[in-house]
Image (tube, rainbow, N blue to C red):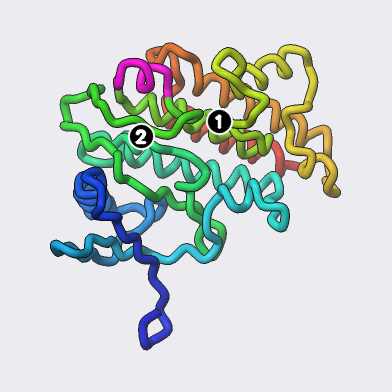
Amino acid sequence: MLRDGKIFAIKVFNLEFEGPFKSFGTECEVLCKLHHRNPVKVISCCSNPDVKAIILEYMPNESLEKWLHSHNYFLNFVQRLDIMTDVAVALGYLHHGYSSPVVHCDLKPSNVLLGEEMTSHLSDFGIAKLFHSDESMRQTKTLATIGYIAPEYGSEGIVSTRCDVYSFGILLMETFSRKKPTDEMFSEDWRLKDWVADLLQNSTTYFIDNGLTTICDQNPARLVKCTSKIMELALTCTVDSFEERIDIKDVLEELKRIKLYYISK
């Protein structure tokens, strides 16, 4: 906290390992070039032989991870939908709104930070890839988080904007089911998306977070229908073939349509 009461967050890199040097440079390079409200805002940075740190805008409501998986916190349907819409807007800017595509590469609840008005902001660009304007994909040895990583990224190191779309689909499923892709009920042969697809095919609604269905809702049938549409959208984001995945711009438009339907009288 500064003397005027302004609060910042400071991300300090552990210099005992070689990796932080690269991730610090990557994060500074990417964040300093982005000018949009949904990626977290960089205030300044500190770099010398002893300390490497990034000074960031403070997010008082912490992360989506905390709100989904802590017992004392709860997000209603519209809040969850708005948060995911903000994330889709951020990805749309990274993929299409900047001079060259930026792939976040590590989309997960702990990297979605929530501001004072619960506006979501993407954080942790340490393994992001800043493409050249003529690039559409790249091969890398850097791995992202198990459970959220696209198949082609995990098996061959192929990175493209569609990797973020896959991770976004997993994030959608987790946000509305409160099931982590690393939950003990899942395995290499039975993933979160397989569970969702199976329940949708059998016309059940067990994939919906119990908290959403037990609170007082003006139209529970509409909530179920909208959540089912969200899960169907998530499945189109997570098809194994990256060429067949939906573009994030189309994901955003569908999320907007779902919200309009949900709040309509």
Q: How far across and how far down the image is residue 189, in percent?
A: 58, 13
- Say which element carries label 2: loop
Q: Is residue 18 above or below residue 4?
A: above
Q: Residue at point 34% right, 28% down? A: 161
Q: Which of marks 1 and 2 is nearer the N terminus?
A: 2
Name the kind of residue labelled 2 in the image.
Answer: Cys
Q: Nearer the viewer, residue 27 or 251?
A: 27
In the rendered structure, find residue 225 and report the number of the disc placed on it. none
Image quadrant of residue 221? Answer: top right
Name the kind of residue labelled 1 in the image.
Answer: Glu
* Horizontal relation, residue 37 to residue 55: left or right: right
Q: Residue at point 34% right, 30% down? A: 143
Q: In this view, does 56 lie above or below 226?
A: below
Q: Residue furthest left?
A: 49
The answer to if 157 sits in the magenta stretch is: yes
| Neighbour tally class for label 1: few under 14, some 14-19, many 20 plus, Cα within 10 Å | some
The answer to if 172 sits in the magenta stretch is: no
Give the extent of the magenta segment.
Answer: 150-158
Residue labelled with disc 1: 254
Q: Nearer the viewer, residue 133 or 173?
A: 173
Q: Residue furthest front?
A: 16
Residue labelled with disc 2: 105
Residue 242 visible, this orientation: yes
Q: How far across and how far down the image is residue 98, in percent?
A: 26, 41
* Horizontal relation, residue 251 to residue 163: left or right: right
- Closest to the camera, between mark 1 and mark 2, is 2
Q: Nearer the viewer, residue 204 or 51?
A: 51
Q: Is the magenta stretch mostly helix, strand or loop?
A: helix
